Image (cartoon, helix red, strand yellow):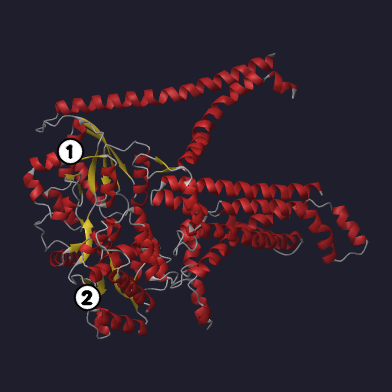
Amino acid sequence: MDIIRKNVKYIIAGMLPALLIYFIFVLYPIVRSFIYGFYDWNGLSEPIYTGLNNFKIILTDEVFWQSFKNNIFIVLFSIFGQVPIGLILAVILSRNIKGAGFFRTAFFIPMILSTVVVGLLWSTILNSQVGIINSILEAIGLEELTQNWLGDPKLAMLSICAVIVWQCFGYYMIIFLAAIQNIPEEILEAADIDGAGELKKLTNIILPMLWPTVMTAVVLCISGSMRSFDLVFVMTGGGPANATELMATYMYNKTFAIYQYGYGSAVSLVISIISFGLIIISRSLMSRNLSD
Amino acid sequence: MNRRVLCLLLAVIMLLSFAACGASKPADTGSSSNSASAAQSEETKSAVNDNEAQSAKFTLWHSYVGSDQRTEFMKEIMTQFRAKYTNYEIDEQQIPRDQYQTKLKTQAAAGQLPDAFVIWPNAMTIEFSKAGLLADINDLLSRETEWKDKFIGRALEEFTVDGKTYSAGLGVSVTSIVFYNKALFEKYNLTYPANYAELKKAITTFKENKVIPIAHGNKAKWPAQSSIISCLANRYTGSEWLDNVLAKNGAKFTDPEFVAALTTFKEITDMGAFNKDFSSIDNVQARDYFYRGDAAMMIEGSWAVPDLIEKLTPEMKPNIELGILPAFEGGKGDANVMSGVSATGIAINAKASPEQKTAVENLIMFTTNSDAQKLYAKSNIPVSYKDVDIDSSTSDPIYTKLTKLISDHPLVTVYDSALNSEQADIVNNGLQAIMSNQKTPEQIAEQLQAAVK
């Protein structure tokens, strides 16, 4: 602390360049873009100040709320999909079973693929005309189960979520694996001596000791899901008929596809507020848990 | 103490290097561009050159790059242009079509448009000219009447707002051509449909025989609107109706004719006329079904022709014919028309200096004069002159068929060219909603009408 106080001038001098860049290229544009949220602006003509009008429109904009719902759907699907799958796999793979190393790598591979690759890959797999899923279903005589996976508005969101889970569960698996390895050996040995079975050890020792990690995973899930954009952008572009529109893709489309810069900025401000709210909720969730 | 000196030294070095970075860059480019232009002017002096054009430096943005049908054309024409006008220094930026409009409009929002750039006719020209971003070429047109008079009407008209013309189209884009596989029609004893009943019969027959009736890819949302609805709606409403709707002149999107057009579109979709994955693949992917002979028809624009010529197998090629949408009973429109617009054209920034303006005007003429028109034909792009001497013995048979199609059928406007970006977005998403049974034609019509301001 003393060193910091003594060197405060040099520290400021050293940080100044970075701060300057940060202000000019990050903070200023963000603030500026929020200000445009109060204007009606198509990017070409002069912006017209319209006060809260954009926000009033957002309140009744069904596509925006549809995309909000889709975001929440992804959040829930991720929390109840990725986290449990990751957890179960981590528990299984932490044992000395045959081929654990192979499975660990295999499950983690989707995570290191670029989202565009994942998107294109699954678009082809899920394709309703030539896709492998429908072909297999037809080949084994389950034709009535074939679906228009990405083209049916009722199914498209579900298909996207499944792909997100496929892509991300490996990440949570690795987090949980690391946490399981941190559980002290002695506790498990003590449990063995006391005659606890495998299930008892899992529910009474491993899970409670993993709980803080689970909460971290949930927070990661929420923040990751709120900013999902790329997978939907690649796979459906928000279609069919806005069925898979997310808040971020909607903001992008409004701003950069139909050039309502003012409205797009307002949407981004609302997204920031919503995300901020969710982060506060999840943080309080976490800190309560840590203080337990 | 030592550490303090070291710390100070580091901070100073960092600041200095930062400042040096900032300063050296412009100085560098300045000197290099100076030397470049010096070298160039020397070259100009020494070169035997018969044009007296003033030297000028301008930036040009265009989207003729990558898989665009005009890529080769642009490469060749720019080489020729540079060779002819050696004293022009052109900074040419090629931006892929998908990002082009976004990038251009973002640049416009920042007030930093290039000196010359490619724009789309109708709605975009209106938008840009109303914002005072474009310089007109009326002087040029009145000066070069011989050049001007050779154009087909829409190549200039669609770039004209309130009597001022801003560009000239580099060719024409027909958006609703029905490409069909004659062999498949013959195999199932069908003739190319002339009316809706025959179209329905063809669709059912193909479906029964496991042939995709119409290959279609609408993931990008605009193909259904540009290639199908623009023409289909015209069959029902006639040509003046759309102008009247947009001018609020007694017509409305909720009029029964337009709703009938959307309903017919829904019927065709519900019959299973398209490949099942139409909403999850794009139009380029959809062409594969047609190329492989899995699909009997494909409704696409003239931009697909170069791709078609390149990818069709020699056995397939003679089977491919070009047609227009059939007539629809009770429609008010002329059943002989198809939809199309002028292709994009080069426009001049309102802020360009007089020298730059002259230079870009030369470029506009150079990219649309009769030599350029012949080059369009060579790249299988429909021309924007009334008469171009095309050698049919060297051009591809499909291109010859396209030229004949265009001379036989007048063009009517395309929806996304006439509608503003918000309305176009509603139609595009609306058609997806109709095709996936999310919304009824009536709901889309109402939504559209609400966006007419």
Examine the rendered structure and indicate whether residue A27 appears above or below residue A131: above
As helix, strand or loop, the secondary structure at mark 1 comes to helix
Q: Amino acid at mark 2?
A: Ala
Where is residue B39? Give x, y as percent: 24, 26
**Which quarter of the picture shows residue B32?**
top left
Q: Is residue B256 visible?
A: yes
Q: Residue furthest top?
A: B1
Q: Residue at x 21, y 78 (%)?
A: B194
According to the picture, the residue beneath numbered tag 1 turns out to be B83
Mark 2 closeness class: few <14, some 14–19, many ≥20 residues within 10 Å: many
Apparent side of residue B131 relative to residue B21 in the rendered image (left or right): left
- Total marks placed: 2
The tag on residue B327 is 2
Apparent side of residue B358 relative to residue A158 in the rendered image (left or right): left
Chain for disc number 2: B
The tag on residue B414 is none
Apparent side of residue B436 relative to residue A114 in the rendered image (left or right): left
Where is residue A114? Give x, y as percent: 52, 53
Where is residue A73? Give x, y as percent: 59, 61
**Distance from Cα at disc 1 to Cα at disc 2:** 50 Å
